[in-house]
Image: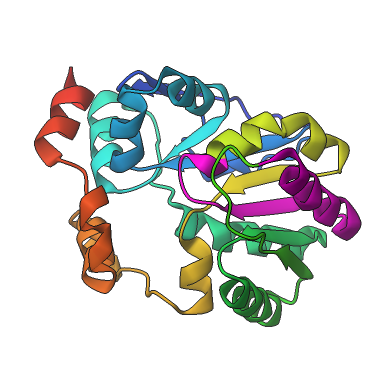
Amino acid sequence: MHSTTHDESLSLAGIVFRGITREVLLADRDELKLIFPVNAELILLAQNDSRFRGILSKHYSTLDGFWPYLIARLRKRRRVEKISGSEFSHDVFAYAARYNLKVFFLGAMPDVNRTAREKVALRYGIEVDGYSPEFAPFPYPAEMNERVLAEIRRSQPQILLIAFGAPKQEFWLDEHQADLATAGIRLGIAVGGTLDMLAGVYQKAPAFICSIGLEGVWRVVQDPKRIKRFPNPLRFFRISLR
């Protein structure tokens, strides 16, 4: 299967965003596509990490969150979409159901991984497998990477959602791109806390909260420890508007 969709892109804060519409992300392809939802926190993180910035630009980064989406709309007159990991995952599950594709959840706590798989499989009628590796400092030791890849090869999925947290999940997908392609993965998506939302640990922000750019505040209310990761609005807009 080959795509006829023209891949457009935009540049924001030194990052090239190639995944600006769902049409581009879900266009049928023969090769592996890595997808990275990028919010304001990750945009700021990338400013001090050239390797991370390069990885985000090389693959299919999306505009995750109201702030990046707002800046993109100001910069680009053509169609762009706000695509977060939690929202896009449901598009992916519907896509998997349509084409009879198998999904694999990698990461999160074992009970969260299992509950998320059960709920998604029941709701969408798709096959969902998964694996939750033990905690280890990053970069992961070779034996841990091989265990993870062995689980993926055993399961033979076509779609991989990885929840290692940023930037570990983005680094890991990029480092193992060739292994994943060989294993038959066609979509590899960094989803962060999405598995927790799918399992019901956290609730997704209501639409009106998202529409006024307060998704991050909603997450902090549910998990106060995240206040340390809340992006500085002034720094974000200063970097993004220059």
Q: Does 92 sit above or below residue 49?
A: below
Q: Position of residue 213 (x, y in %)?
A: 20, 53
Query: Could you tell me which residue is drawn at 30 percent across and 22 percent down?
Result: 13
In screen coordinates, is 54 left or right of 143?
left
Q: Position of residue 64 (x, y in %)?
A: 38, 45
Residue 19 visible from this viewpoint:
no
Q: How many marks?
A: 0
Q: Quadrant of residue 166?
A: top left
Write the residue at 76% across / 67% down.
129
In this rendering, does residue 159 appear at all? Answer: yes
Query: Could you tell whether 188 is left or right of 221 in the image?
Result: right
- Residue nearest the viewer, comparing 46 with 98: 46
In depth, the one of 55 and 67 nearer the eye is 55
Is residue 79 left or right of 130 when viewed as pictured?
Answer: left
Which portion, as a residue range, is magenta?
A: 141-169
Q: Position of residue 2 (x, y in %)?
A: 80, 32
Magenta span includes 131: no
Is 171 placed above or below 8 here? below
Q: Residue furthest left?
A: 234
**Split into 4 quadrants, where in the image is the N terminus?**
top right
Q: Residue at x 87, y 51 (%)?
A: 153
Location of the C terminus (image quadrant): top left
152 in the magenta segment? yes
Residue at the (75%, 51%) spot, across then down: 148
Q: Is residue 48 above or below residue 158?
A: above
Query: Residue 180, percent across and down?
Result: 78, 39
